Every structure is written in structure tokens, then in C-alpha cells.
Image (tube, grey):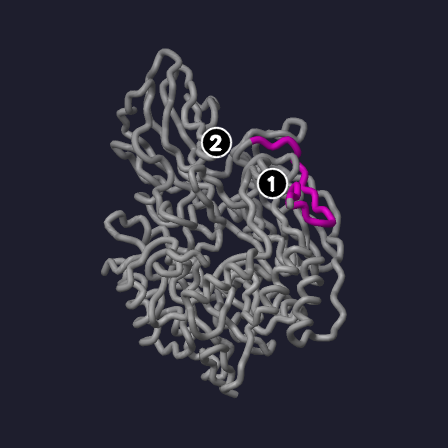
Amino acid sequence: MTSRFQIGETDFLLDGEPHRIISGAMHYPRVHPDLWRDRLRKAKLMGLNAIETYVFWNAHEPVPGQWDASGALDLGRFLDLIAEEGMHAIVRPGPYVCAEWHNGGLPTWLTADTEMTLRSSDPTYLAAVTSYLDRVNAIVAPRQIDQGGSVILVQIENEYGAYGSDKAYLAELIRVTRAAGITVPLTQVDQPIPHMLTGGAHEGLHKTGSFGARISERLTTLREHQPTGPLMCMEFWCGWFDHWGEKHHTTTFADSARDLDELLTSGASVNIYMVHGGTNFGLTNGANDSGRYLPMVTSYDYDSPISESGDITEKFRAFRDVIAKHAPVPDEPLPEPVDAPVLSVPLESVGDPLPLVAIDHGTFATAPTLDELGPQLVLAEYAAAIDTDRTRVLEADVRDYAWVSVDDRPTGILQRTIGDLALPVPAGNELRMLVEETGRVNYDTKIGEPKGIVGDVRLDGEPIAGPWHVRTFDVPALAQAVADAAPGGTLAGGRAAGPVGLRGSFELAASADLFLDTAGWGKGYAWVNGFFLGRYWRRGPQRTLYVPGPVTRAGRNDLVIVELETLTDATARFVARPNLGHEVE
């Protein structure tokens, strides 16, 4: 059955009748696809009538021309499930999305072009964006509400007024979107700050806001810039994200519920960001840099009403009570959290697994960046002769973390997060640097900055002459490489120096959510049954990795970890509940 969704003088209109959107954000790649329906049903149980999602260009097209919309990237299926659950959908395809996601959703092959002006009417950039949007809109267009689907709104760009004010750019995005058959209303979002609302505005877009407090003040500012039509908070921030090395953030559920009540009492529509955050699986975490580079953790729990593992929280209950004052809420019992299986798994070593997935790029006169070597690279080894007979000071702009050795003897670590980009190195013949990109900036002007080694590597202020021999490593391929490798390496009292691959197996009576405790491990990556859980780091605050139930199976299950630093406990422990770190209000 088809319907019509419009923007009226004072309200959203569904088939001509006033309609209030009570939505929640849920990003399909951050949730295992076999759990989409469960999470959607829980969101509906809270009283939501819509689900919003970003679309992540770099996930769908990691290599130019190689489009993937399968599995966890099947946006069409996700939108269909929303429709099947009797809910509406809001789609925000960017092309830039922020979202604490790697590179703000822009592909690294795109941002590697230093001649291109991002997020502008630069013809080269627009050509790539047009190709992307055409692919996305081919999925979205037949799923619009006037075609019998779920989609009621499509957003153009994202928080653009905080970045630029190129009206020709916005106009072209609107043109491309309409030409692709998108007929539902188009929106924009910015924080309710005058210069942002002005910079991101276009006559073809309905303005919405992003904020989490000071509700009346923010709505007043938004109304000054959107004098007609419904008011909507497109991102009602009910929690926050975490960086490695900082505390786990939460918000008091009573305060968030009070703000939500004020928002709904005003008559505004809302999209709760996030209703269910999910997980930065694999290598998808982003980073921020407002003077200090800070990468995101693997969990994207966001202190959401529905937790990372799908539990109903106190915030969920408080929000449900608030929504019930303003709209119908399903009268159904709420599921209680269930403890995950608890077990310990001894791990065996296969030695250094990096040579098993190495790609030799040859030699270079100067150290290249990862962006110059190819898309989607996160780990590289740089080697050069130094032939020095005394201790010298090494300096390098590494992005973002580097293990340094001389003649295969570990020498120290360079790390951007704490500004530690120099160290003494002893006499020797060959310098090696294993450099890891720990997350690409997802906000502001440092989106797309080069990674790896940037500029000269210096000894006592003098550039190392080179040549540099460079290898990169296919990190996702490490899971199979470690699983297939012969045993090797040494575990002395359960301890080992990385890089080292470890593996183990365990039995389950049935598939189940698990929480992998990373205590005793340093810095690395983990997989269960070949599914890339993501990064771990003793820096915290996150202490457990979430293993989605559909990843596991009855009978034998296989675990692989790749430790890059220092392992002090060659045991994998699965615990009953998640530990995301010390909480602060």
C-alpha cells in the first residue's frame, strides 16, 4: 500500500494528516544482519515509529568500482525489514556522514587525491559522488513510502554548515538525488548555531537540528532559521562515544528522559541518536582531532537505550515512559538481560603471522604514505639502512602508532595520541618501523589526512637517505592465515612479545552472544569463526569485545587473535557481562 509523506505549514503530513516522527538511529553495518529484526522490534517496543540510518560509502565501495551491498551492507533488506515491522525509515547517505566512522564514511581512495577539494562543487569530487549517490538511490527510490516502502525522508550531506557553505555543491546534490527518483522531502541537519544553520542551508532542504540539551533554546534558534514547517531534532544526543585512553561516557537516564519529554512536549519530532549504537566491527572506527588525535574504541554502545548487545536498559525504560505520554506504545513485556556463557580457552602460538599476509611494494627514495600505496591499508613496515655507530635521536610524523627496531632489536614506540614522535635509537645498521593507522579522523578539516609515515624520517635532525623498503599487511586476511598456520613461536609462562598470532577453540551447546575479555593482552585484533570483532587495546576504557550470537554455533568455535605488542596471558576468557570501562556522568 502506498502513502504520501509531505512537509506542511506546521507539521509533517502523512496522507494529509499531521504526523509526528519519533525515530531512533541504528546503523546497519554496526549490527550483525541476523540481529537487525530483533533490534528493530525492540526499538518499536520503546514506542518508535521510524528508524534512521546513515549510508557508509567506504563500506560499500572500499575499492573504486567494486560495489558491495551484501550481508551486513544490504541496505535494501534493512529498509525492507523496517517496512515489515510497520515503521518508517529516514536515510542519510552523506556522502559525508561523520558518525564516528572511519574517514567520516569517505573512501580512502577518494581522499587520497590531494588535488580534489572534498565536500565542494569541485567537478572531480562531484563526479565520484554522483556515481555513489546513483547507486544508493537505486536502492532507496523503490523503497519510498509512495512506492509502498518505508522511506519518508532523505538527508542531503551532513552537518555541512559546520564545514562549508558551497551552495552550488548542495544544489548539485539535490539535483542528483531528485534525478535518481527520490520524491520524498529532503532535509539537512546542523547544530542550532546561526552560522551553521546558514552555511548548510539551501531552499530545497528542510532544516533540522542536532542537540542533546537546552531544548527550548535550541528549538527557538532552529525556528528562527526554519520559520515554517515542523521542527525536528534529527540527532537527539542521548549518550556519547569513547576514545581509547579516556573514560567510558554515560549520561544520567533521568536527565536524558527529561530533555526528551521537553522536546516532545514542544510538539517537535525527534530522532534519538543512538537508539542502538552497535559495534565498530573490523577496522571501521573513526577518530577525532581537535588539537589532539584520539581514535575511537571498537564498541559503539553510545550509552544507548538498547545496549551494544541488544539489552533493554534503564534509559530504554525511562524513554518508553516518556514516549507513552505523547504517543501509543506497545503494551508488551520487556525482555530481561541474559548472562553470556562463561568459559576459558587456552591459546597456542603460531609465531609472527605478518609475513603470511605481507604485500611487498618494493623500494622508495622517501617513505610513502599508506594513501600512496593503496586503499584500505592500516599496517605497514618501513625499513632503511642507517649504519650508525652511536645512539641518535629518531624523529618521525607517524600516523598513528609505530613500533621501532634496530637490527631486529625492539627500540621503542612512537605514538601520535600523546605526541611522542621522537626517541633515542642505538647504533646499528637497519631501522624498521611497523606503523599502524589506528582510525581515520571523521570530523572537520582533517578528514582524509594521509596516514603511515608523513614527511622525512630524521636522525639527529637529518633525513634518512633511503631507499626505503616497504611492505603492507592484509589485516583482515590474518584470521585465516593464523587458523591455517603450523604451530610455532614461544609462550614463556603464557607470555609472548608481538607480533604473534594465537588461536584456540571452544565448545558451545548453542549459539550465544559472548563477551571476550581482553585483560592480559596488549594491542591487536580478534576474530571468532572468521568474523572480525575489531581492535583491542590495553589502554582502555573498553575491556571486552562483543561477539554477536549469530557468529557462534553449537559445537566447535574458533578464536584467533593477533597481538602486536605484549601478551601476558595466553588465555581467552569469555565473561558473563560486558565491561566498557569506568563510567563518568
Residue 573 within the magenta-colored segment of the rendering: yes
Furthest-top residue in this view? 390
Marks 2 & 1, CB-CB < 8 Å contact: no
Q: Tell me the residue that label 1 is attached to.
A: 247
Residue at 28% of width from left, 27% of height from top? 466
Please rate how many residues cluster around mark 1, counting C-alpha atoms within 10 Å: few if below 14, some from 14 to 19, many from 20. some
User: In the image shown, does 84 or 379 lie closer to the viewer?
Assistant: 84
For residue 314, side relative to residue 194 (left or right): right
> Tag 1 or tag 2, which sits nearer the N-term?
1
Q: Which residues are magenta?
A: 566-584
The picture places residue 168, in percent across and down from the top left corner, at 26, 64
Residue 245 within the magenta-colored segment of the rendering: no
For residue 418, side relative to residue 444 (left or right): right
Number of numbered discs overlaid on the protein picture: 2
The picture places residue 322, in percent across and down from the top left corner, at 67, 66
Under mark 1, the amino acid is Lys
Under mark 2, the amino acid is Ile
Q: Which mark is residue 562?
A: none
- Depicted 203 relative to depicted 116: above or below: below
User: In the image shown, does 353 or 535 lie closer to the viewer?
Assistant: 535
Residue 125 visible in this rendered orientation of the protein: yes
Q: Tell me the residue that label 2 is attached to.
A: 418
Q: Secondary structure at mark 1?
A: loop
